[in-house]
Structures are given as C-alpha cells and as structure tokens.
Image (cartoon, rainbow, N blue to C red):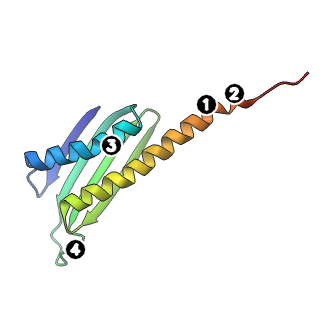
C-alpha cells in the first residue's frame, strides 16, 4: 500500500502522521487490495471556528477509486470521521465484489 500524507497550510507532525497511519490500518484490515492512499490535511482560513480543519482522502483499490472528505473544528476528529466514511465505502465495495463472484456458484442444473 502506497501512503502519501500531505498538509496544506499545516505542518504534518510525526504524531499526526502516525495517528493517520494507525487509523488507515483499519481499512487495509477489511480489504487487502488497497493500492494507493493519498491524504490531504488542510486548515482553512474561515471566520467560523467550527468546520475549519479538513481531511480529504483518495483511495485507489483494485477496480475502483474512492474519495471522502470531512471537516471539523479538531483535526483528529476530522480524521476519525474521514476513516469512518472510507471504511463504509471499502466494506460496501468488498461486499459488491463478493456478491458478484458468487452469483454463478448458486446456479444448479436439474435434469
């Protein structure tokens, strides 16, 4: 799995990098065919304090690309919300692949 973590108007500290990495391990635990993950962490210059910290992620898995984003006043909470969204997408993708592969196995010919 190729992992790229970058920051916009933000320095990605080693603690933040390790937090994102451990959270993204949950996705690779559900689906092992993850090829590429790109995470972008930004701090927007809005007047309102809430929804200012933003996390975006692009995931390339075998056969599909997925995208999710999350905004929160705390960057760690935004990462948590982002990983929850991605986890749901990956599980749904995995279920679709498994259902597609097992459709032909259920056919029974009766003579």
Q: Which residue appears at 15% of the width and 45% of the height?
A: 17
Q: Can you name the residue that lies furthest to the bottom here?
A: 48
Q: Nearer the viewer, mark 1 or mark 3?
A: 3
Residue with the mark numbered 2:
105
Residue with the mark numbered 1:
101
Residue with the mark numbered 4:
50
Q: Classify residue 100 by image quadrant.
A: top right
For marks 1 and 4 on the same chain, the one whose residue lies earlier in the sequence: 4
Question: Marks 4/2: CA distance?
Answer: 51 Å
Q: Position of residue 95 (x, y in %)?
A: 54, 41
Q: Can you name the residue that lies furthest to the top here?
A: 111
Front-lying residue, 30 or 103: 30
Q: Which residue appears at 21% of the width and 40% of the height?
A: 4
Question: Marks 1/3: CA distance?
Answer: 24 Å
Q: Position of residue 109 (x, y in %)?
A: 83, 24
Q: Is 97 on the left-hand or right-hand side of 83?
A: right
Q: Nearer the viewer, mark 4 or mark 3?
A: 3
For marks 1 and 3 on the same chain, the one whose residue lies earlier in the sequence: 3
Q: Are marks 2 and 3 in contact (CB under 8 Å)?
A: no
Q: Are marks 1 and 2 in contact (CB under 8 Å)?
A: yes
State whether residue 42 is above or below residue 86: below
């Amino acid at each position: 799995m190729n992992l790229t973590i970058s920051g916009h108007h933000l320095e990605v500290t080693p603690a933040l990098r390790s937090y994102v990495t451990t959270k993204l391990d949950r996705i690779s635990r559900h689906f092992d065919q993850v090829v590429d993950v790109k995470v972008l962490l930004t701090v927007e210059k809005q007047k309102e304090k809430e929804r200012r910290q933003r996390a975006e992620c692009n995931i390339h898995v075998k056969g599909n690309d997925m995208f999710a984003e999350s905004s929160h006043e705390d960057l760690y909470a935004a990462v948590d919300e982002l990983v929850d969204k991605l986890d749901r997408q990956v599980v749904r993708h995995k279920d679709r692949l498994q259902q597609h592969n097992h459709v032909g196995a259920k056919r029974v010919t009766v003579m």
